[in-house]
Amino acid sequence: MNLEPFRTALSERKAATEADLENLARELRELGGDNGDEGGSLGNHLADDGSNVQEQERIIRVDGDLRAMLVQIDDAFERMDAGTFGICARCGEPIAAERLEYVPFVAYCIDCQAIVERQNGGG
């Protein structure tokens, strides 16, 4: 299997994900920039404070998802280096090329992915 297209796609995805993380960090700083030292926001209305908290929570959730994706991308690079890229980490069967083209950092074939998600309580 020619890994170069996958390596390129992973590098591009990693760079975009890192840029997204930087943007989220900036947004989070901007949302917290109005807060005083005690964590209050004296100049804002209560409704504004609630909106800011909701936005901060959203950013933190997205940040976590992006960081998890970075781990998966780095793991995919490691599988490339180890010669196991494209092989399901659970059953050992090849992962469909179409799946790898769409999500190049996957570690599982589609059937095993469903099993792992059920075991982890994911949907």
Image: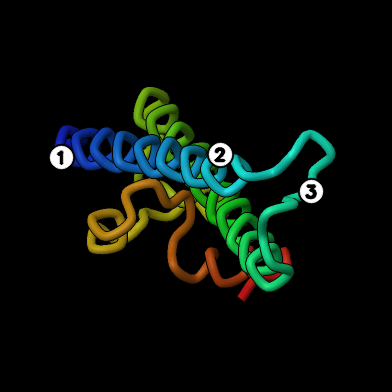
Which residue is labeled 1 in the image?
Answer: 5
Q: Please state if 41 lies on the left or on the right of 28 as rendered.
A: right
Circle 2: residue type: Arg
> Label 1: few (<14), some or many (≥20) within 10 Å?
few
Q: Name the residue rendered at 24%, 34% in the picture.
A: 7
Q: Name the residue rendered at 78%, 34% in the picture.
A: 37
Q: Quadrant of residue 112?
A: bottom right
Circle 1: residue type: Pro
> Label 2: few (<14), some or many (≥20) within 10 Å?
few
- Between residue 75 and residue 59, name the one nearer to us: 59
Which residue is labeled 2 in the image?
Answer: 29
Q: Name the residue rendered at 56%, 54% in the picture.
A: 59
Q: Name the residue rendered at 56%, 39% in the picture.
A: 29
Q: Position of residue 43 (x, y in %)?
A: 68, 54
Q: Earlier in the sequence, mark 2 or mark 1?
A: 1
**In which quadrant of the rendered image does the N terminus lie?**
top left
Which residue is labeled 3 in the image?
Answer: 40
Q: Position of residue 78 (x, y in %)?
A: 44, 27
**In which quadrant of the rendered image does the C terminus lie?**
bottom right
